[in-house]
Each structure stands twice: as structure tokens, then as C-alpha cells.
Image (cartoon, helix red, strand yellow):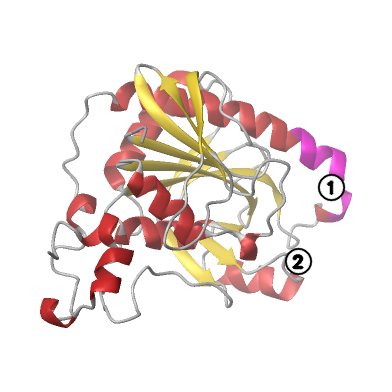
Amino acid sequence: MPKAKIGVIGGSGLYQMAGLTEVEEVNLSTPFGDPSDVFFIGTLAGERVAFLPRHGRGHTLLPTEIPFRANIYAMKMLGVERIISASAVGSLREELKPTDIVFPDQFFDRTRQRVSTFFGGGIAAHVSFADPVCGDLVDVLEQAAGGTLKGIDVHRGGAYVCMEGPAFSTKAESEAYRSMGMSVIGMTNLQEAKLAREAEICYATMALVTDYDCWHPGHDSVTVEMIIEFLNRNAENAQKLVAGAVAQLVNKQRTCKCGDALRHAIITSHEKIAPEAKERLKAIISRYVD
């Protein structure tokens, strides 16, 4: 099986990764089903990178339909240690403008129909999630943004509200999130972040602002054409940013806590873990469970 140390998950508008060379398409199956699409594994800035379109090519999957567990488990199978996730978001703050890039450091879960853990079925684990993104990886992304993106405002920190969708917020919901101090709103990244932590993979979100959420007085003047233009511009910026970040990550050793997230998290007595559970989670728990 091909290997890659860095994974990139593309969101709305980012269905391919420019700059990849020596690309191979890899089909994977996992104990949690098939991922959203094939993985495109290629070389970028001297490093092997695994790219996955979150919604599938052609955008065939609603947020609730995305096979989050399969996507992250497959990344683990490929040897991925760091995931950079691109996500189109609406802004809940005046200062976060369309085409701005936000690196949120918190999530707020408003989903209702999704499984957000690999565990269960005879094995219990509770990972720490107080700080849901990898600060070291965000450091690299922030530095890369400064070196590769000109004329784009980049913001570090803030809370990403993850809603169920597929409909967007009501005005009452949007105003409530603003009153709670939230920064951006999207439909996908919370599950990825939780699962990446369980898989001991560093994770960071590039939140690409496409529009103001419906709280904004100018919301009704936003057209589909404007949104598509912003998506295209965001996708171009995201690809430049990823390339810059990957160049900095080549041969960079992990010193964060993400790689040991499960060390004290598995609660179930090892002798009580059924063989089928061990096999199902082998890619994740084999360091700790024989």
C-alpha cells in the first residue's frame, strides 16, 4: 500500500490538489466502510501527500452522508500523521470577510445524526479534546500563509460551529451563535477533528470564508454567482497555502501530544476486549493493545 505522512481533505470548491506529481489513485476499504472517494497520493514539495475530496468528486455527498470514520481510518492506514482540512464556512463576525482564511482553535457541536468516535462495540476510550486542533500544525499554516498569500487576511483562533445541515441557519440561530461568541459556521469539521484525535493524527482546519451568515444585513444581496467566485478564489488560496505548509513540514518531527492521545484513554481492560474489536481498530490501537 502507498504511504503518505500528510493528508489533505478538500471541502466545497476544492475537489483536486494542484501541484501533485507522480499521482496514484488509491481505493481503500475500511472496517467502517468506504471513504468519500479514491485517495490521490502524490508528491508535493518533496513530501508524499494523500488528498481526499470530502464530498466526493462532483460533490455527491451531503455533510451528514460523509463517511467520516472511513475517511480518517483510511488516512491512518496510509500512515498519515498530519491532516490539513479545508472547509468552506460562513462568517459570524463582521471582521471575518469573504475570502479571508480562519484557523479556528475551538469547535461547537450542533450536529445530531452523526457518529463521532471509532470506539464502542466492546471497547471504550475517552480522549482529551479541550484543545481540538494541533497548535503546532496551525503554527506551520500561519507561517506558510504569511509567506505565500498576499492580500488575503488570515485570522488565528475562534470557534467553528458545526451544524447538521444541509439547510443553512435561521436568523435566530445565527444571532444566537453570534451572542455566544462563535466565529464561523460550517457543516463538516467537528467529526473529523474528534476522529483524528482518536487516531492520534494532528489536525487543523483552514476555514475559508465564502459569505456572511444570514445575520448580516447584506446577506440577501449575496448571489450564487458571488458564492461560486469566492469558492474558486478560496480553492486557489488553499492550494497555495497547503503547498507552503507541506514544504515546511518536510522532515519536521512531531513534538505535540496528538501522537499519544490514546496512551491513557482506553478504559476497557485489555483482556475484556473482544478479538473482533481488536481487529476492527487495529490501525488505531495496535500500539497499546496486543
2 or 1: tag closer to the N-terminus: 2
Give the residue type that dot 1 points to: Val
Q: Tell me the tag on residue 11.
A: none
Give the magenta-colored segment's residue range.
220-229
Q: Quadrant of the rendered structure where residue 49 is? A: top left
- For label 1, the residue is 222
| Of 13 and 21, the residue lying toward us | 21
| Of 258 and 161, the residue lying toward us | 258
Confirm whether the magenta stretch covers residue 225: yes
Give the residue displayed 68% in from the left and 38% down from the top: 13
Give the residue type that dot 2 points to: Ala
| Of 97 and 72, the residue lying toward us | 72
Q: Is residue 46 above or below residue 115?
A: above
Q: Quadrant of the rendered structure where residue 10 is? A: top right
User: The C terminus lies in which quarter of the figure?
Assistant: bottom left
Residue at the farthest front position: 275
Residue 22, given in percent of the width and then of the height, sits at 47, 17
Give the residue displayed 47% in from the left and 57% down from the top: 70
Residue 9, given in percent of the width and then of the height, sits at 51, 42
The prevailing secondary structure element of the residues shown in magenta is helix
Left or right: where 210 falls relative to 100: right
- For label 2, the residue is 167
> For mark 1, does the 10 Å Cα neighbourhood hold few (<14), some (14 to 19), or many (20 or more) residues?
few
